[in-house]
Image (cartoon, rainbow, N blue to C red):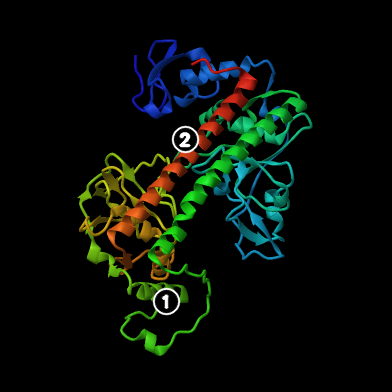
Amino acid sequence: RHWATRPMVGIPARSDTFFRVGPAELGKAQCFAVKRGEVSRRADVAFHQPWIRDRLAALENSSFVVNSLGTIIAEIRYGTGSPPLYLKQSETTVPFVRATDIKNGEVNLEGLLHVAAQQPSHMDKCRLAGGELIIVRSGVNTGDCAVVPELLINSFAAYDLILTFQANASAKFVAAFLDTEVGRLQLDSVKGRSAQPHINAQEVAAIRVPLPTLTEQERLVVEIDTARDERKEKLAQADALLGGVDDFLLEALGIEVLPNDSRRVFAVKRSELHGQGRLNPDYYHPARTVALRSLTAASRNLAVAPLAAVASFERNQLGAPGENYLSLAHVQSHTGELNDLTVTATGNCFAYSTDDVLFARLRPYLNKVHRAETDGCCSTEFHVLRVKHRDALMPEYLATILRSRLVLAQTVHMMAGNTHPRLANHDVANLQIPIPNMQIQESIAAEVVHRREEARRFRFDAEAGWREAKEWFEGQLLGPVTA
């Protein structure tokens, strides 16, 4: 007999059984057997994982009629065409929904890009109508889906699958089902396993869906929508706690809150250029100038020093990533909290220690700064900063001030490059940092830690409640999980 050492089918020479060996992340069993007669549609490891077969069996035994999705679809079409030219929002533009705008069963309305309301005829397939279901068909979030909200009617969504349903099926119900474990495992098992995951219309149409009456569908949707709203409320509470840190910090330092200045046109006196060694206009943006003036005024009551004077730049390079690897994607913007991501990395990285501060030099406007809570390694796009004198500067305070709008106003106007804007090393070293006495630093650090712990509690409760709601939704259709 033979079996595969890669996630593929190993075909025995004389046997009625396929033997498989797959990586741990594909399921709970790494080696299992499947009879040849059970392989009818797909011959890959993921599709025939035992726990998947158990859940699919429970699906087929549902007390409701189980249909292939294709039997309840009125129309399924591909978004087509190249992404159109993005424009500034106006009366003649409409939103354009990208794959990254779809998450947790809905379209994230914040940060939507806009395009002209009148598009070439080949974009008509991308135009959205009310009650349609969008399914992401390629990329890292393949299979994520959302129902088109009213305010996005006549907007566009290219490259996705767009579905409308017959009268006996609710798009919101189908979207909620596809986000359950049994819905996701069907999507995950059929999507192409290439460098760019993808699904097509035929694979989506084959997905099995239990279909209660419309009244029952609406009842289940109301319950899952209520749970989604509760999750969003708790996440908003967490964001509010961390978002208020900046105002607290500036007040504690006695620095006036900086105004939001997004001017694109401004004047600079010739005398202000003297000794700067820079001629790029953005370097002299009023927002940066005001921040530096605020620091000059604050220096009457507290110390102000360049970053290099208070922190060392550690460059202990490793040949390959190890445990606790952090990429830029792991760090949330403006909060420094970590995302729960699985990132495969290769190549060089920097080692860091507990209480080192990781400061991203790529795309500084994303404002990614993290105080390490463990030892580990990180992308070389981070600067690893280590406080020189712990009795004069607290790592928690350093991370907080580097995330503040006081420093952000400096960094966003010093970046260079178009495709991958980043900070020059000497600009980071010369960032001006206010350093209050230890008593003030301790009070700031204590407040930040308190807010972070509360925010994490809100987020934990939000995700736990959302997970329970989806399990309840699935249980109403399939019965409870009996692992």
Q: Which residue is mark 2?
A: 193
Q: Is residue 343 above or below residue 279?
A: above
Question: Dot 2: what SS?
Answer: loop
Pick the residue in front: 296 or 441.
Answer: 441
Q: Is residue 235 above or below residue 16?
A: below
Neighbour class for label 2 at 10 Å: few (<14), some, many (≥20)?
A: few
Pick the residue in front: 241 or 204.
Answer: 241
User: Which numbered disc flags the more N-terminal residue, 2 or 1?
Assistant: 2
Residue 202 visible to an observer of this rendering: no
Residue drawn 35% across the image and 75% down it: 296
Pick the residue in front: 13 or 224.
Answer: 224
Circles 2 and 1: CB atoms closer than 8 Å: no
Residue 111 visible to an observer of this rendering: yes
Q: Amino acid at mark 1?
A: Thr
Q: Quadrant of the N terminus?
A: top left
Q: Which residue is mark 1?
A: 289
Q: Within the image, what quadrant is residue 477 found in? A: top right
Is residue 417 left or right of 171 when viewed as pictured?
left
Residue drawn 25% across the image and 48% down it: 352
Q: Amino acid at mark 2?
A: Arg
At which x and y percent is residue 76? 69, 38
Q: Is residue 439 above or below residue 277?
A: above
Residue drawn 51% across the image and 72% down it: 261
At which x and y percent is residue 70? 68, 30
At which x and y percent is residue 22? 38, 25
How far apart marks 2 and 1 lie (CA) works out to 51 Å
Q: Which mark is residue 153?
A: none
Q: How many marks?
A: 2
